[in-house]
């Protein structure tokens, strides 16, 4: 792989990760300021609890499974700097992208679609970067989407 491609993979991973972790708090601030139009119990509170509870449950599962990373299995240095041993399955980065995408989609569908597409690009990037297998990012994406759908479209309507 060319040095340019390697630097692009590292750069893309860093920029998208920073951006998504800025988008989510921005969504929460927006929901808080829109509390007259979107009540807290249907806006801000679910937007915090559904991703938060899902993230904790995913983290517990991931710690239990403790799947090795590609650079451990193949004894090759990853392009994306990572020193963690294990905890590869499912990808928490990609899970986070897709639970945030699903959360945004619930309130602002075009933003959710854009974040989902960006999440797919980040998933590919993390595989190319050598820190996840395809199964890790696919599971992270599917679990993130499933948790969002379950929380926002199944459980939340039952409560209200």
Image (spheres, grey):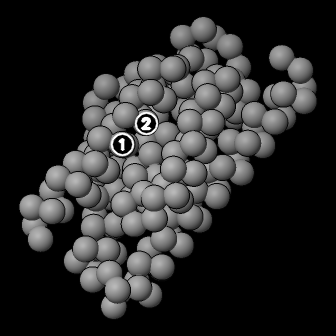
Callout 1 secondary element: helix
Instruction: Name the residue at the front extreme.
Output: 110
Q: Relative to the observer, which residue lies in front, 103 or 89?
A: 103
Q: Give x and y (percent) for residue 45.
A: 28, 73
Q: Is residue 98 visible?
A: yes
Q: Which mark is residue 107?
A: none
Q: Give x and y (percent) for residue 145.
A: 36, 42
Circles 1, 2 touching at the beta carbon (< 8 Å): yes
Left or right of residue 9: residue 128: left
Pointer 2: what residue?
141
Instruction: Name the residue at the right extreme.
Output: 3
Give the vertical position of 89 relative to 159 (above or below).
Answer: above
Q: Is residue 56 visible?
A: no
Q: Relative to the observer, which residue lies in front, 125 or 132?
A: 125
Instruction: Name the residue at the top extreme.
Output: 74
Q: Residue at x 50, y 64 (%)?
A: 24
Of the 4 image quadrants, the one containing the C terminus is bottom left
Decide: few, some or many residues near mark 2? Use Cα within 10 Å; few <14, some 14-19, many ≥20.
many
Give the vertical position of 30 relative to 133 (above or below).
Answer: below
Pointer 1: what residue?
145
Q: CA distance from mark 1 to mark 2?
A: 6 Å
Q: Residue at x 34, y 66 (%)?
A: 47
Q: Give x and y (percent) for residue 69.
A: 52, 21
Of the 4 image quadrants, the one containing the N terminus is top right
């Amino acid at each position: 792989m060319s040095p340019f491609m390697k630097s692009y993979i590292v750069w893309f991973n860093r920029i998208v990760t920073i951006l998504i972790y800025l988008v989510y708090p921005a969504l929460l601030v927006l929901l808080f300021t829109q509390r007259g139009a979107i009540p807290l119990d249907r806006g801000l509170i679910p937007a915090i609890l559904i991703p938060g509870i899902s993230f904790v449950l995913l983290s517990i599962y991931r710690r239990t499974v403790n799947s090795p990373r590609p650079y451990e299995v193949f004894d090759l240095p990853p392009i994306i700097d990572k020193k963690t041993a294990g905890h590869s399955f499912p990808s928490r980065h990609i899970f986070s992208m897709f639970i945030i995408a699903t959360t945004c989609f619930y309130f602002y569908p075009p933003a959710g679609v854009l974040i989902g597409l960006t999440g797919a690009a980040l998933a590919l990037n993390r595989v190319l970067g050598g820190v996840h297998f395809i199964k890790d990012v696919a599971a992270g994406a599917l679990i993130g989407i499933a948790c969002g759908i379950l929380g926002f479209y199944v459980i939340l309507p039952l409560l209200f």
